[in-house]
Image (cartoon, rainbow, N blue to C red):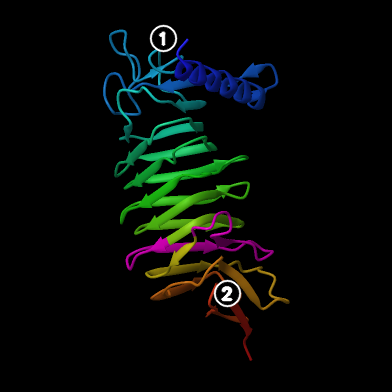
Amino acid sequence: MDPRIASRSALQLCAAAVFTVGLITGADAIEITYWHGVINDTWGQGISEGKSNWYSAAPPNGDPREVPTEQANFYEGAQRLHVHVREDAKIDHMAFFTEEYSFDIHPGANLNVTGGISIFRVRPIFYIDGGVFFTGAHSSGDGAIFKNNRDGTLDFSDATREPRAHGIQNAGLVNIEDRRVIVDYFHQTAVGKLRVSMDRNRQGHLSIGRLVTAKSVSLAGELRMEGRRDLLVGLPKRILIIESGESLQGQFATVTFTRFPDNVIPGIEYEPQRVFLTLTPKE
């Protein structure tokens, strides 16, 4: 057997074993569907005239399947590697085993990832003109690159564990709420907006450049700080919002504050590698 085929087969068997063991709930295993892109480049294209964009096994094998909602696997050999999300789609898990896949999220369309993203080789890139939302108990964008355009939304606010991504380039809106989001780099343009919403215990911040040596942070545009009326305002009075493994470049041009207690004055304070929310009692 060709060693390349043997290697690929071993990878598929190993991956199948990992996800079969890891994603069984009770007696029901998660259904795994594979992207082939046979008909066109559209995520939402299911079975038509005996063909589909989605199949039961990695390319070129398998039987046509409808559009998945549980686990979508992306291997080499697909006929199209640039995938378009033109209408709302929901998927529990996305797994990448080879090739450089990219995704266009079109205006008015949302991709809701309720589980997460697993990457075994090349990082996928998401170009967002609609919305990408991470929700659910295991939601994360591990290793992915997000290029959030002016009308795009990248939302981690409903993720219930610590979300991660390789990089975010933001010219749209990024939402962070109640927990730390870890990325390797974060670049925000002059039209970008970062919204950080605090929970009652002062959680909610962006941690940058903590995973690999490639650390790069540039700030511009708007920071929207959303507090709570019942926010605990005892010590500490300085609450970490952004931390980086290297010096920050730039500052936010605009900072807005909403939903903070009436007896405090919120502010922003910059250090070379960190940005803090400050809470000063009113006299």
Considering depth in this image, is 72 or 173 the residue closer to the camera? 72
Q: Position of residue 94 (x, y in %)?
A: 49, 32
Query: Is 227 placed above or below 131 here?
Result: below
Q: Tell me which residue sits at (63%, 47%) in the image.
A: 161
Q: Position of residue 248 (x, y in %)?
A: 48, 72
Q: Is residue 262 visible?
A: no
Q: Tell me which residue sits at (43%, 51%) in the image.
A: 154
Q: Is 69 a magenta residue?
A: no
Q: Amino acid at mark 2?
A: Phe
Q: Is 189 a magenta residue?
A: yes
Q: Which residue is mark 2?
A: 276
- Distance (Cα) linking label 1 and label 2: 54 Å
In the rendered structure, are the residues bearing label 1 and label 2 in contact, judged by CB atoms less than 8 Å apart? no
Provide the residue span drawn in magenta. Answer: 187-214
Q: Would you call the spot at circle 1 few (<14 residues within 10 Å), some (14-19), or many (20 or more)?
A: some
Q: Amino acid at mark 1?
A: Asp
Q: Which mark is residue 63?
A: 1
Say which quarter of the image contains residue 223.
Answer: bottom left
